[in-house]
Every structure is written in structure tokens, then in C-alpha cells.
Image: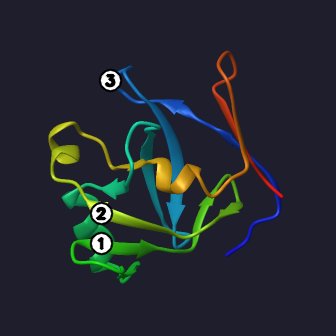
Amino acid sequence: MSIPGEIAIQTELHSSGRWITVPLVVGGIHRISAVLDTGAPVSGLSPRIEALLLGNALLRPGTRPNRYRLANLTVADQLLPDIEVAVIRRLDRLEVDGLLGLDFLTQFEHIHFHTRLLQLVLERR
């Protein structure tokens, strides 16, 4: 899916104070907080969120085992592109719902982060 223009996202601090999170809404009904992780090559979900989304038929099969396609994602009523996610077991231990890695971020031409405002701006052609 091609999302033209700019997407402005108000991020939040994780309850631990250690990570920046993006408040995603899946399927218009489930809110999850995904850590913005520029060092992770692959985006992911915790097993707890995997079970929740599977139970509500909100995950589609991915291209590889242990992968799902996460579709119908929004943030502040702005549509985001679909992403493929892996199930990452350590996220449950860290009390993290999911993470957005480089595979998500490279879908955009420009990425800006306003540190004082905690605002992420994603820009496509």
C-alpha cells in the first residue's frame, strides 16, 4: 500500500521511561504500543499481543513461519502501511506490546523525530 504525503505521529514514553512508543490501533479496535527501534531489522509483536490479535482475527499469514501481516493499522486516525511482524518472545518479559523496526521505517523516504515534542514525522513521495 502506498501512503502519499506526510504522517505525523505523537509518540509516547514507555512506562519504563526507556523507550519511545508509537500508539497503534489495529483493526480499529485494539490499541498497542510499539517501541520505535531503529536498530531492529524486523518489526514484531509479543506473544501476548499475538494471542489477542489472533483471537480477534486481526492477523493475516506472513511470508515466512512465525510471521504475520499486520493490516488496517492507524495512528491518530492516520492510515499506516501494512507491515510484516515476527513474534518476539522477549517482548513479553520487557512488557512491550510490539516494536517497529527498520523494515517499517524504510518504507518512508524521510523520517524526522522532534525530540522536544516527541513527534515522529514519516514522509513518502
Q: Which residue is mark 1?
A: 67
Q: Residue 49, located in which quarter of the rendered image? A: bottom left
**Would you place residue 26 above or below residue 31 in this image?**
below
Q: Give the SS element for disc 1.
A: strand
Residue located 37% across and 64% down the image: 85
**Considering depth in this image, is 23 or 20 the residue closer to the camera?**
20
Instruction: Report the disc number at residue 86.
Output: 2
Residue toward you, 106 or 120: 106
Residue 86 location, x and y as percent? 29, 63
Select label 1 or label 3 by which is in front: 1
Q: Quadrant of the C terminus?
A: bottom right
Q: Nearer the viewer, mark 3 or mark 2?
A: 2
Alpha carbon separation for disc pair 2 and 1: 5 Å
Q: Position of residue 77 (x, y in %)?
A: 70, 59
Residue furthest to the top in view is 116
Residue at x 40%, y 36% (from the top left corner) = 39
Q: Tell me if label 3 and label 2 are in contact, CB under 8 Å.
A: no
At label 2, which amino acid type do we have? Ala
Which disc, if any, is residue 16? 3
At x 53%, y 47%, the residue is 23
Label 3 Cα crowd, 10 Å radius (few <14 / some 14-19 / many 20+):
few
Q: Secondary structure at mark 3?
A: loop
Separation of disc 3 and disc 2 at Cα? Answer: 23 Å
Within 10 Å of disc 1 (Cα), the crowding (few <14, some 14-19, many 20+) is some
Q: CA distance from mark 1 to mark 3?
A: 27 Å
Inspect the image, locate mark 1, and give the three-letter code of the amino acid beneath it.
Arg
